[in-house]
Image (cartoon, coloured by chain):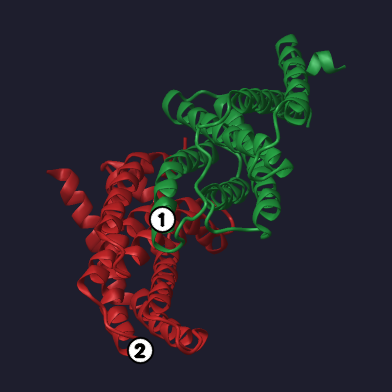
Chain colours: A green, B red
Amino acid sequence: MLRTLVSDRVAGVAALAVGLTAVALALIFFYVPTDGDQGFSQRIFYFHVPIALTSYACFGWGAWKALRVLWKRDPQADLESYTAIHQGVIFGALTLITGSIWARASWGVWWSWGEDELVLFLVLFLFYCAYFMLRYSVEPGPQRENLCAVYALFGVVLIPVSFLAIRLSKQFIHPVVFTSHGPQMAGSQFFTFCIAWAAMLAIFATMYNVELAGKRVDAHLKELRELLA
Amino acid sequence: MTYFSDVAALARKDVLLELRAKETLPSMLLFVVAALAIFHFALPHGSGHVAALGLLWVALIFTALLALTRAFVAEREQGLFDALVLAPCDRSAIWLGKALAVLLFLGCAEVVALPAFAVFFSGVDARTVAAVALADVGIAAVGTLLGAMAVAGRARELLLPLLFLPLAMPIVVGGVGASAGAGGRFLLFLVLYDAVFSLLAWASFEYVVAET
């Protein structure tokens, strides 16, 4: 039954996702040494940052498909853009949640306006939630495709602008005491991070393809019903 | 150049309509003064100048939302969108004409709001005025495009604030930072925001009003 819904390629991506996730979990909990500063809770980093980066990738992919809608009039691209942004919001919500858990573990507060990633994600999360409000208030059709595509493009331009704004505001409103982790990690940490990131991207690719396949089946079914009616 | 005469004609249409109806601008002026009065009560005693400046920017953003919600009302109620789209002008001229009119209304509102703020709270310096002017350009550019999007849907008045506020956050950051004297780079940031989003809005408006 699953074979008819998803192609062999998607099944392959799913298998890759399962494999990478298993390896990543093993590395995170058994291989990487415990961080000197933060202790065991630092391992949330290996979930939080890959999820955040994957969510950026989702929005970027959604914006690319949105460009295809406007530029090439690609008929498939609207659904693909919507699915990517939907996944992006899911990963974005996970970013906010894992970020809050990490903040609670590290600093004892659930939220910190001083942490770039959290604030940027809040702005983006709100922006892309409004995407769904927009999408569902317009009747399906070419106009809805165009509006959603333009909005998705605005979102991807907002990412760097917001990042800059948040950087600026931190210098003024919140003096930064906590210096963020740079790429100056131990080799084992960087390796684990990369595997975790690859696992998250593979999870996104799998969920994206499965959701897309489901939505296409829905659309096909709707067409058939309309033909019969 | 017919493009700029189209833009001028469209902007003139909006200003004339407002001069005759006298709906949007008076309500904006009243709203901004009332909001500033409420903020006086919202701020606890001994709050600094910076807190008051923050609330000035909140008042400006929400007053702008008032103007933007009304921006495409005439087009929607009288079915003008079809006529505008059929007109032999570049679609982006519609955006530019409307954005210029909105900018004018925002400017008129600030002419009242800033002295009111100076009276209710404390003084307003040249940096604040510059920041407000730059922010108005950004608000007009982005808000006009989003207003056109919101009009296409069902939940129009509900949708526009949801669409607008995330995009307005960088404006508030730049504006408050510049007003509070945290450095010229906040003004530069506002210039960057205006340039980037105006260009994007100008380029993408034709897709927003296109039916196909």
Q: Is residue A124 above or below residue B76?
A: above
The amino acid on which the numbered mark 1 sits, given as a three-letter code, is Pro
Kindly tell me whether residue A220 is visible in this rendering. no
**Secondary structure state at the residue bearing disc 2:** helix
Q: Residue at x 33, y 50 (%)?
A: B193
Q: Nearer the viewer, residue B150 or A10?
A: A10
Q: Is residue B154 left or right of residue B113?
A: right
Q: Residue furthest left?
A: B1
Q: Position of residue B172 (x, y in %)?
A: 40, 62
Q: CA distance from mark 2 to mark 1?
A: 26 Å
Image position, residue A228 (x, y; %): 78, 27
In percent of width and height, residue B167 lies at: 45, 53
Task: Classify A20 as above or below A120.
Answer: above
Q: Residue at x 15, y 44 (%)?
A: B2
Rendered position, A187 above or below B202: above
Q: Are marks 2 and 1 on the same chain?
A: yes
Residue toward you, A155 or A55 = A55
Label of residue A152 in the image: none
Going from the N terminus, do you reach mark 2 or mark 1 first? Answer: 2
Camera-side residue of A116 and A41: A41
Residue highlighted by disc 1? B170
| Amino acid at pointer 2 | Phe
Callout 2: chain: B
Host chain of mark 1:
B
Question: Badge 1, how many Cα within 10 Å: few under 14, some, many 20+?
Answer: many
Residue at 51% x, 86% y is B44
Q: Position of residue A130 (x, y in %)?
A: 57, 51
Q: Is residue A191 left or right of residue B34?
A: right
Q: Which residue matches tag 2?
A: B120
Residue at 71% in and 52% down: A105
Q: Quadrant of the N terminus of chain B?
A: top left
Taking depth in this image into account, of B147 and A200 the one nearest to the observer is A200
